[in-house]
Amino acid sequence: MKSLTIGETEKTLTKRAMSVEQAVKMLEIAQQKSTRDFLIYRLMAANGFQVREVVGAPSRVRTEGKWAPRDPSTVGIQIRDLRKDGIWIRFRGKPSRFKRVKPEVIQAIKNFIGSRTDGEIFDLTPSGLEVNTRVYAGIASPNWKITPRMFYDFYRCASRLFADVDEVLGLKVTPERVLRLAEQREESEVLEYKSEISNTNDFLKSVVAFANKRGGDFLIGVEDNGDILGVSDRDLAGIEKRIVGLTHDFCSPPIVYTTERAVVKTRHVVVVHVNEGSAKPYFLKDKGPYIRRGGHDFIMTRDEIIAAVRALPKRARTHRE
């Protein structure tokens, strides 16, 4: 498959599809605002799912100026449809179809589902997705006119031009991405540098704080000033296992995160991406709930805790009570 530059790709994509810049920005905004919406867009833009396959077909249709009920052809992805290497798409009156999905995406969806065992994965209607997409497009640029269908159209075009659409969309950790983050030379609300995990308490505070805010990335092997020192071979061997143990023992409820490695200038950097939580507030054992403000972690105020609980979906709030 021919490898094209982003500039060449922009010229090749159809008018109905988003540009690479638009797709990347929409995914970034969704990731900051809603894990649910980010996963929906990722399934469409990077995996080729259609809107109706993910959130179901509309249950009503407008005819002669009036809304009339309609039996939807699909009901959206159900929890029972998940497999370790893909998702079953079920249609009314038609054979089901299996779509392969990368294991890391399946795991992210399972983490989002949490303790639920039945029903739809994403509690969102097609019209609700339309509304959210307009909101995110407005945040990105007042001139952007983006619809959910355009994520699927983007995939149809980009998958013919690139071997790995995830990489094009910035969803894959690459040396170039790590270098860009390091060259910012400053931590932020969504970025933390760690030369190593020597102070586990500070590391876990930031994990919890990211989950209680917008999520964020750790660059392990990077100094506070952005210099890349790398993770030693000794620490590299067991770092993922150590992080799993720490988060399991000291963070509650369970926090969704991923770990990946990149080699930058011959040095190993471990990138830990913490998702924004869907079951806030999250607590650090014996310490309390933390939240990210700027480049620092703070104990959540009473008002912040109340706001986090009120923002939970009703079923999650009931489960906690």
Image (cartoon, rainbow, N blue to C red):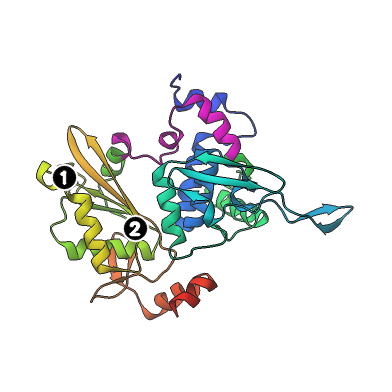
**Above or below, comparing residue 200 to residue 168 in the picture:** below
Start and end of the magenta stretch? Answer: 152-177
Residue closer to the observer: 95 or 233: 95
* Residue carrying label 1: 236
Q: Residue furthest left?
A: 234
- Residue plotted at (42% across, 41% down): 102
Q: Which mark is residue 52?
A: none
Q: Quadrant of the C terminus?
A: bottom left
* Residue carrying label 2: 189
Question: Disc 2 residue type?
Answer: Glu
Residue 279: % across, % down: 43, 68
Residue closer to the observer: 41 or 80: 80
Secondary structure under the numbered disc 1 in the rendered image: helix
Q: Is residue 63 magenta?
A: no
Residue closer to the observer: 73 or 157: 73
Decide: few, some or many residues near mark 1? Use Cα within 10 Å; few <14, some 14-19, many ≥20.
some
Q: Residue furthest top?
A: 2
User: Does the rendering let one see residue 145?
Assistant: no
Q: Earlier in the sequence, mark 1 or mark 2?
A: 2
Question: Disc 1 residue type?
Answer: Leu
